[in-house]
Image: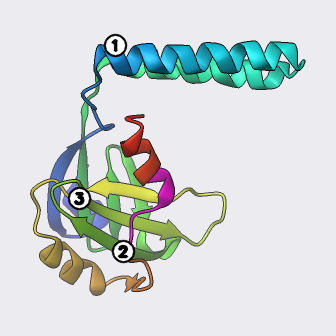
Amino acid sequence: MADNKYGKKLIAWQFPEHEDYERTRGWYIGAGIIGLLLLIYSVFTGNFLFAMIIIVTAVIIFLKATLGYKNLDFAIYERGLRVGEKFYDFKEIKDFYVIYEPPTVKNLYFDFHSWVQPRLQIPLQSKNPVRVREILLDYLTEDLDQENEPLSDAMGRMFKL
């Protein structure tokens, strides 16, 4: 992907496709027991959709743990953002915000105009959040009301999902 297609590349870095948590044997045993209990409950109550959700969740956790992950390239250009092979024009993005609470939370978030487009989370890695913010302010508005990471991210980190 040539720079001229998206304008000048302003900043770029790589980040892992998903968080790779250190899970102990106890975590897997606890998760297995909870999953099994929820599965038994769903069968006894006749809620087979819930049972399928539990099974699919277990398969996803297993695959993430065994398949590993790859690094994704992220870049901010004059026209938008590139994450891996996907490009997001600045016109699609409503706003951004930075949550920086090292060492646990160092993320950049983008909200889109379209309600069907989920929030985009980009780990800042070792990038200077002030510099990234300065670059983005030339193209997007910052959501200054966001002071904490989204609850879904905090829960995912807490439960190592």
Q: Which residue is mark 2?
A: 97
Magenta segment: 148-153
Q: Residue at x 23, y 58 (%)?
A: 75
Amino acid, disc 3: Ala
6 to 71, vertically: above or below? below
Q: Earlier in the sequence, mark 3 or mark 2?
A: 3
Q: Which residue is mark 1?
A: 66
157 to 132, vertically: above or below? above
Indicate the quadrant where residue 132 lies: bottom left
Q: Earlier in the sequence, mark 1 or mark 2?
A: 1
| Residue 86 x %, y % | 40, 49
Amino acid, disc 1: Thr
Kind of element beneath mark 1 = helix
In this image, 155 relative to 123: left or right? right
Q: Residue at x 90, y 18 (%)?
A: 46
| Residue 112 x %, y % | 53, 68
